[in-house]
Image: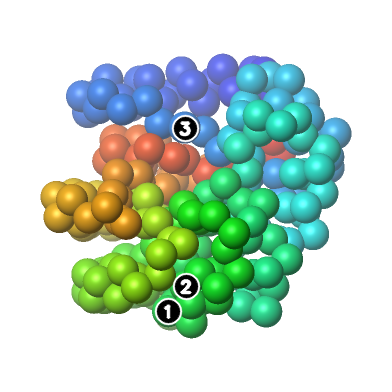
Amino acid sequence: MKDNLAQINLEINEHREKSNISTQPNVIAVTKYVTIERAKEAYQAGIRHFGENRLEGFKEKKEALPKDAVLHFIGSLQSRKVKDVINDVDYFHALDRMSLAKEINKRAEHTISCFLQVNVSGESSKHGISLDEVNAFIEEIKQFENIKIVGLMTMAPYTDDNAYIQSLFRKLRTKRDEIKKLNLEYAPCEELSMGMSNDYPIAIEEGATFVRIGTKLVGE
Ligand SMILES: *Cc1c(COP(=O)(O)O)cnc(C)c1O
């Protein structure tokens, strides 16, 4: 685990230097495939951000990890399950429809930090709203006082075409910059959640502030 993390940190710094990126991205250990013990090992190795995509796994890891662990819900969430988990979530990465925003707002006992999930590639298998819909979606979110849009999130398709992946990450960054400039109190939109085991070096070069790494960090 320590070696994996050291290797990833090394690569992160290489790619930051290569593209003159000053932001130090946060590494989220995606523990959805692994045991509680393995998640604890990641904590011991110094990881503080953890990501889970299912309700059961999320609850289990949240309970087992020390209080200063930051828990990210990174998967799509059914509206009827919102009430069971949303108040335990430090960051929710998969806001992808208005009905979900409405339910989160209704069940929230405090402000929930959310990433808007964007389907940049337009692939039908991916969750998320299209880039074209982001501005209108954010405008509409204004009515929900318990939701804060902290940033944008995307998942790139699996492909060896790095230039294509890079173009998708760049489009998301450009949209993030555009929203951030609006200076909306309820949507500061400073963060970029992008990059997984197979494409995080590209995401780093495009200014990711959170990378979500499972396989390469904690294993399958
Ligand atoms: C599983 C998952 C990851 C991590 O995937 P790896 O390829 O194992 O790094 C990242 N983001 C989301 C949304 C996921 O569901």
Comparing 35 with 99, the one in front is: 99
Name the amino acid, label 2: Ala
In terms of image quadrants, where is residue 83?
A: bottom right
Residue 155 falls in which quadrant of the image? Answer: bottom left
Q: Position of residue 86 (x, y in %)?
A: 63, 60
Which mark is drawn over residue 101?
2
Disc 1 and disc 2: Cα gap in Å? Answer: 5 Å
**Going by the image, does 103 lie left or right of 203?**
right
Which mark identifies residue 98?
Answer: 1
Mark 1 residue type: Met
Residue type at the position of mark 3: Asn
Q: Identify the residue under disc 3.
A: 26
Q: Nearer the viewer, mark 2 or mark 3?
A: 2
Residue at left 38%, top 38%?
209
- In the rendered structure, which disc, 2 or 3, sits on the residue that comes first in sequence? 3
Q: Is residue 20 visible?
A: yes
* Figure quadrant of the N terminus: top right
Is 191 left, or right, of 109 in this rendering?
Answer: left
When the figure is inspected, residue 50 is found, relative to residue 105, above or below; the finding is above
Task: Indicate whether 168 appears above or below 100.
Answer: above
115 relative position to 77: left or right? left
Marked residue nearer the N-terminal end (3 or 1) = 3
